[in-house]
Image (spheres, helix red, strand yellow):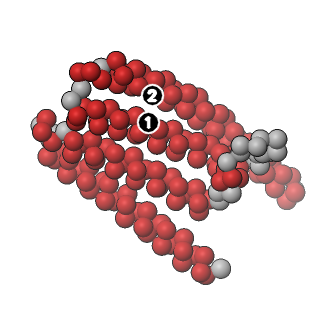
Amino acid sequence: MEKVIERFIFVSRWIMAPFYLGLVIALAVLLYKFGVELFHFVTHAGQFDESDTILGILALIDLTFTGSLVIIVIFSGYENFVSKIDATGHSDWPEWMTKVDFAGLKQKLLASIVAISAIALLKAFMNLDRGVDEKQLMWLVIIHVVFVLSGVVLAWTDRLSEKAH
């Protein structure tokens, strides 16, 4: 009975595979949004002042970081929780894709979230002259600081657990 239960639990990891396939579809939607934003940025570039140009670039960077975050989750999550990906025959296979463990995945995720939060905060600062709500700006700063502190605490606890082993 124990072997049957263990086998059932082991096979159940494949339930996660559709989640990762769904993230691939979400990545395609993000690519579409990036294309729309890029088209708008390029076609209106002549009308932009310096601030608008920087904000347009920040929007593209934000979407790129989000796409990178999704890629990290897809590859690392699939490798850690479902099955190993065979990288043989792919000469340009990024080394990190098969090397990120769960602790590394958490750190990469939080670092990406901090970067995305920083871009949102920078956008708000760039819009100060356009009447950004001070309360909203305050909350953006608070949220960003919480993300940064969370990253520091996560790295610190991971380091402590490494020393314990």
Q: Residue 19: x percent and y percent? A: 62, 37
Where 113 sits versus 157, above or below? above
In the picture of the structure, the residue carrying the numbered disc 1 is 63
Amino acid marked by disc 2: Phe
Nearest the eye: 129 or 111: 129
Q: Quadrant of residue 149?
A: bottom left
Q: Residue 105: x percent and y percent? A: 58, 56
**Quarter that holds the N terminus:** bottom right
Amino acid marked by disc 1: Leu
Q: Quadrant of residue 119?
A: top left
Residue plotted at (21% across, 45% down): 125
Q: Is residue 123 visible from the viewing direction of this image?
A: yes
In the picture of the structure, the residue carrying the numbered disc 2 is 34
Q: Residue 165: x percent and y percent? A: 65, 79
For numbered disc 1, what is the local secondary structure?
helix
Residue plotted at (12% across, 39% down): 129
Question: Which residue ends up furthest to the bottom in the rendered image?
Answer: 164
Report the Cα–Cα distance between label 2 and label 1: 6 Å
Quick one: label 2 or label 1, which is nearer the N terminus?
2
Residue plotted at (85% across, 59% down): 2
* Label 1 Cα crowd, 10 Å radius (few <14 / some 14-19 / many 20+): some
Question: Which residue ends up furthest to the top in the rendered image?
Answer: 43
Question: Which residue ends up furthest to the front in the rendered image?
Answer: 46
Q: Residue 59: x percent and y percent? A: 36, 35
In the image, 134: left or right of 111? Answer: left
